[in-house]
Structures are given as C-alpha cells and as structure tokens.
Amino acid sequence: MEEDVSPTLDYASPWVITGGLLNKAQDLLVRATRKGFWPMCDQGVVSLGNFLTTIFVARGLATKEEYGLFGVLLEFMFFLNNLQGGLITYP
C-alpha cells in the first residue's frame, strides 16, 4: 500500500503569506531597477528638498503672514516652471 506523499500547504503558516509577498516584492524591485528606479529616486530627492526648504523657511520667518507670502511666491514659481515646460520644453 502506498502512502500519499503529495505536498500540502498549511495556510495558517506565516511563511506561505510572507513567501508570496517576498517574491512579489523582489519582482517589483527587479522591474523598478530596469526602467524607473533612477527617475523615481530623482523625484524623491527633489520632493525631499522642497519639503526641507519649506520647513526651514517656516522656522526662519517671524510671522505667519511672511510664510503665507512665501507660499504664494513658491506656488507662482512652480506655476511658471510648469508653464515653461508645457509651452517650450515638452512640445
């Protein structure tokens, strides 16, 4: 008489879930490094720089009104940058 030696999965085991997620994370990392890793890092650095600039300016200015003026001017600069990109750089 032969015994049933087919593998069984224990769905209560955390290794089944972790192994699946780990494989998906590794696959995502491999795909990201092929094409979009460096642009994503560049965007992260620029966003972090903008965030830190805002924090330092907010701590350095004396009143909320000055910080509000800074915010309006910064948004206007971002608008001009996007306008220039849309009209000159990208077409």
Image (spheres, rainbow, N blue to C red):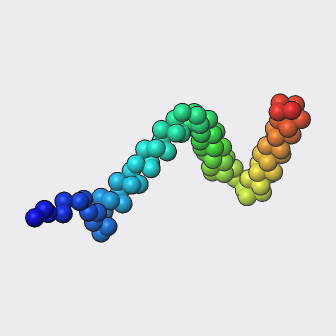
Q: Which of the pair 31/63 is nearer the observer?
A: 31
Residue with the most extreme front position = 1
Horizontal relation, residue 41 to residue 11: left or right: right
Quarter of the image with the C terminus is top right
Residue 8 spot, x, y in % from top left: 26, 63
Query: Which of 6 and 40 lies nearest the eye of the viewer?
Result: 6
Q: In the image, what residue occupies the spot 74% across and 53% down? A: 67
> In the figure, is residue 32 to the left or right of 18?
right
The spot of residue 50 in percent (x, y) is 66, 43
Residue 31 visible, this orientation: yes
> On the image, which quarter does residue 65 sit in?
bottom right
Q: Residue at x 77, y 55 (%)?
A: 68
Work out which residue is located at the far bottom of the displayed protein and give it.
12
Q: What residue is shown at x 53% (from left), y 39% (from top)?
A: 32
Q: Residue furthest right?
A: 87
Is residue 84 or residue 70 the one in the foreground?
84
x, y percentage for residue 64?
Answer: 73, 58
Residue drawn 41% across the image and 54% down it: 21
